[in-house]
Image (spheres, rainbow, N blue to C red):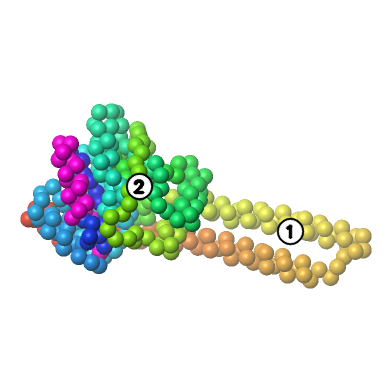
């Protein structure tokens, strides 16, 4: 059996249709399955629909957070709840085509493969700024960690061994796309075309995307910390050059008052110091978040075929 995990945030208009499409495709291909919807603190009627769907169909599990914890938390809640021999992550808006799950399933079942990774054959209709920002983000990740995720997505199938390895990772600040690559295992790729969203609009704003990028870069690599060292070396070299130049001018009697040079040097060094302290402070804040050891999420309800468990936390 495979578990299809679908994080959902304000997807009232999508959840029923998505469940219907996925169910039809799985039934046509005779693939045993369950669908785990995780409601990430939606403010519309998403949870009411999910609850009703779970009570009507034993193959649907509905998980409800106590508030909005974010997609990363919803992914890990789905992985912890899923009972399948393999898990598939996909978006609720069907931009990840469910037909590709069949291909993933067959590769996993018929080959010695632990992870089947969905790769974008194209990025769909994205504006140039978003596309450029995404490419820059993935290039930074690749340079810092060595993981090539330029065409990667959260759309992938993970064998139970890979899922268990992910769940054993203790960090609270998670980046599923990178972590699922970091754990390794034998991987095969499938390519898919990004479909158009049928209902609603993307929940990601520019501010959220920038925050997402910064959080994930700093949670998965310490490369930005090295910028502080580089700045220190560059400043030291500039200081040596300007110091040597000043001594030479003094010796040959062409020394100026030097006031503008002093101001420029002070502004340069002060800016570098403050920027470096900002990077260090950001990492310290991440350490602070981790050592508090709060749960990644809190589950208010889990509904599955006429039984409900309340108050669980992970």
| 299 or 198: nearer the viewer | 198
| 159 or 200: nearer the viewer | 200
Would you say the residues marked 2 and 1 are in contact, meaning their CB atoms lie under 8 Å apart? no
Q: Identify which residue is drawn at 31% across, 42% down.
A: 156
Q: Which numbered mark, 2 or 1, is in the foreground of this view?
A: 2
Q: Which residue is mark 1?
A: 239
Q: Identify which residue is drawn at 57% across, 61% down.
A: 276
Q: Secondary structure at mark 2?
A: loop
Above or below, 285 against 226 in this view is below
Above or below, 211 against 152 in this view is below
In magenta segment, residue 25: yes
| 170 or 221: nearer the viewer | 221
Classify residue 106 as left or right of residue 265. left
Choose the circle earlier in sequence order: 2 or 1.
Answer: 2
In magenta segment, residue 27: yes
Q: Residue furthest right?
A: 253
Q: Identify which residue is drawn at 49% across, 44% down.
A: 142
Q: Secondary structure at mark 1?
A: helix
State the image quarter where residue 245 is shown.
Answer: bottom right
| 85 or 99: nearer the viewer | 99
Q: Identify which residue is drawn at 64% across, 66% down.
A: 270
Q: Is residue 75 visible?
A: no
| Quarter the C terminus occupies | bottom left
Q: Which residues are magenta?
A: 16-42
Q: Residues within 10 Å of mark 2 (few under 14, many from 20)?
A: some
Position in image of residue 73 (x %, y %) = 30, 56
Q: Residue furthest left?
A: 306
Alpha carbon distance from label 2 to label 1 = 52 Å
Q: Which residue is mark 2?
A: 194
Classify residue 216 as left or right of residue 115. right
Position in image of residue 150 (x %, y %) = 45, 44
């Amino acid at each position: 059996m495979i578990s299809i995990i679908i994080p959902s945030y304000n997807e009232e208009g999508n959840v029923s249709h998505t469940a219907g499409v996925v169910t039809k495709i799985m039934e046509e291909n005779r693939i045993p399955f369950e669908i785990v919807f995780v409601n990430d603190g939606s403010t519309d009627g998403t949870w009411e629909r999910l609850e009703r769907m779970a009570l009507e169909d034993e193959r649907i599990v509905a998980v409800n957070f106590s508030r909005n914890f974010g997609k990363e938390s919803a992914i890990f809640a789905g992985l912890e709840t899923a009972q399948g021999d393999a898990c598939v992550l996909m978006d609720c808006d069907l931009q990840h085509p469910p037909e590709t799950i069949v291909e993933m399933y067959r590769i996993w079942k018929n080959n010695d493969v632990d992870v089947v990774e969905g790769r974008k054959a194209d990025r769909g209709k994205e504006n140039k700024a978003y596309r450029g920002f995404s490419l820059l983000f993935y290039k930074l990740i690749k340079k810092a960690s060595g993981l090539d995720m330029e065409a990667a997505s959260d759309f992938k199938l993970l064998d139970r061994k890979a899922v268990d390895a992910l769940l054993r990772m203790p960090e609270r600040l998670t980046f599923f796309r990178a972590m699922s690559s970091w754990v390794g295992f034998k991987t095969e790729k499938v390519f898919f075309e990004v479909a158009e969203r049928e209902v609603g609009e993307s929940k990601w704003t520019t501010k959220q995307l920038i925050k997402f990028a910064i959080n994930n870069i700093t949670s998965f690599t310490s490369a930005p910390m090295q910028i502080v060292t580089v700045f220190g070396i560059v400043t030291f070299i500039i200081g040596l050059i300007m110091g040597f130049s000043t001594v030479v001018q003094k010796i040959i009697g062409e020394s100026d008052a030097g006031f503008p040079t002093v101001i420029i040097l002070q502004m340069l060094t002060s800016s570098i110091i403050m920027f470096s302290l900002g990077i260090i402070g950001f990492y310290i804040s991440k350490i602070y978040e981790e050592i508090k050891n709060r749960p990644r999420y809190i589950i208010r309800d889990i509904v599955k075929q006429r039984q409900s468990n309340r108050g669980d936390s992970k």
